[in-house]
């Protein structure tokens, strides 16, 4: 087992809809994408945890706004993408790098997943992935810096992880994403079933995350750009026949950008 027994992962809500994920074993903790130091510090204090590592996926403020403060306060390692300018990092990572999270003995490998930003990375363990703003439940990140081809490639990289891999996304966007996904695939029974389940979770005040890669393969239109239903819907919306999965992805992403 690369992942120690007794490891727990908690969503710490921040801003409108961010989740700052905290991994902890009862003594030590690591935080992924600390956009704000305040809720993280409050969480650590309320549970008597010592922060031993910070993991950043990309340079946006809602992911790294609290990084420098926390790294200084705790004197801990701060990991982040080699290809982005983030103040306070102590170790810069790229695809193929493996790290053992200090204090937690969790082994994670780094994937380059450009698209949302140019240097975006994800952290994959044997049964989990922290994917920042690349893959969302039933959706994907906006293309601020990368090309559709890059994002499609990054998403296929994540899609190749084992189906049981738990997906820890950085935002609670699920219900809005499902509304769009249902517009693309109104006949997808698994998607419809998921919409009921996630709506019930939200009504009960629970996060919809983590999801799993298997669930995303079944219901996320951005991972389904080769599915005949998605090809047909995207072609119809674009008003022309779309040939390749990247063309389909590009059309679905543009459709979503204008979807209300
Ligand atoms: Zn972002
Ligand atoms: Fe974000």
Image (spheres, helix red, strand yellow):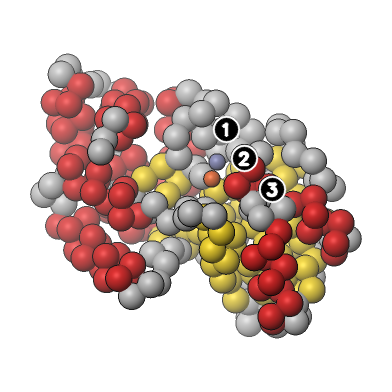
Residue 179 point in image, percent of width and height: 23, 49
The residue that disc 3 covers is: 65
Residue 116 lies, in percent from the top left, at: 52, 34
Numbered mark located on residue 117 in the image: 1
Whether the residue under disc 3 has CB within 8 Å of ligand 2: no
Do the CB atoms of the residues marked 1 and 2 lie less than 8 Å apart?
yes
Give the CA separation, mark 1 to mark 3.
16 Å
- Label 3: state its secondary structure: loop
Q: Quadrant of residue 8?
A: bottom right
Check disc 2 and report the residue beneath it.
60
- Tell whether circle 1 marks a residue whose Cβ is less than 8 angstroms from ligand 1: yes
Tell me which numbered mark, 3 or 2, is placed earlier along the sequence. Answer: 2
Residue at disc 2, secondary structure = loop
The reply to whether residue 167 is in sight is yes
Q: Residue at x 24, y 21 (%)?
A: 243
Q: Earlier in the sequence, mark 1 or mark 3?
A: 3
Q: Residues within 10 Å of mark 1 (few under 14, many from 20)?
A: many
Up/down of 94 relative to 239, above or below:
below
Q: For this view, does 201 lie left or right of residue 235? A: right
Mark 2 CB near ligand 1 (8 Å cut) = yes
Q: Is residue 82 left or right of residue 115?
A: right
The image quadrant in which ligand 2 is located: top right
Q: Secondary structure at mark 1?
A: loop
């Amino acid at each position: 087992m690369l992942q120690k027994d007794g490891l727990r992962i908690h969503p710490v809500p921040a801003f409108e809809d961010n989740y700052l994920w905290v991994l902890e074993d009862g003594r030590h903790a690591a935080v992924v994408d600390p956009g704000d130091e305040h809720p993280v510090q409050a969480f650590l204090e309320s549970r008597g945890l010592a922060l031993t590592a910070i993991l950043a996926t990309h340079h946006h403020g809602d992911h790294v706004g609290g990084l420098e403060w926390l790294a200084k306060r705790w004197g801990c390692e701060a990991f982040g993408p080699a290809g982005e300018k983030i103040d306070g990092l102590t170790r810069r990572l790229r695809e193929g790098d493996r790290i053992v999270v200090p204090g937690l003995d969790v082994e994670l490998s780094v994937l380059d997943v450009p698209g949302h930003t140019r240097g975006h990375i994800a952290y994959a363990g044997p049964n989990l992935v922290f994917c920042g703003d690349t893959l969302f439940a039933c959706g994907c990140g906006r293309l601020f810096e990368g090309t559709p081809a890059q994002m499609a490639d990054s998403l296929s990289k994540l899609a190749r992880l084992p189906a049981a891999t738990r997906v820890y996304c950085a935002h609670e966007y699920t219900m809005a994403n499902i509304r769009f996904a249902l517009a693309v695939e109104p006949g997808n029974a698994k998607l419809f079933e998921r919409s009921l389940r996630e709506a019930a979770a939200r009504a009960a005040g629970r996060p919809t995350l983590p999801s799993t890669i298997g669930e995303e393969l079944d219901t996320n239109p951005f991972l389904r750009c080769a599915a005949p239903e998605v090809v047909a819907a995207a072609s119809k919306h674009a008003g022309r026949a779309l040939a390749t999965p990247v063309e389909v992805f590009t059309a679905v992403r543009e459709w979503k950008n204008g979807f209300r």
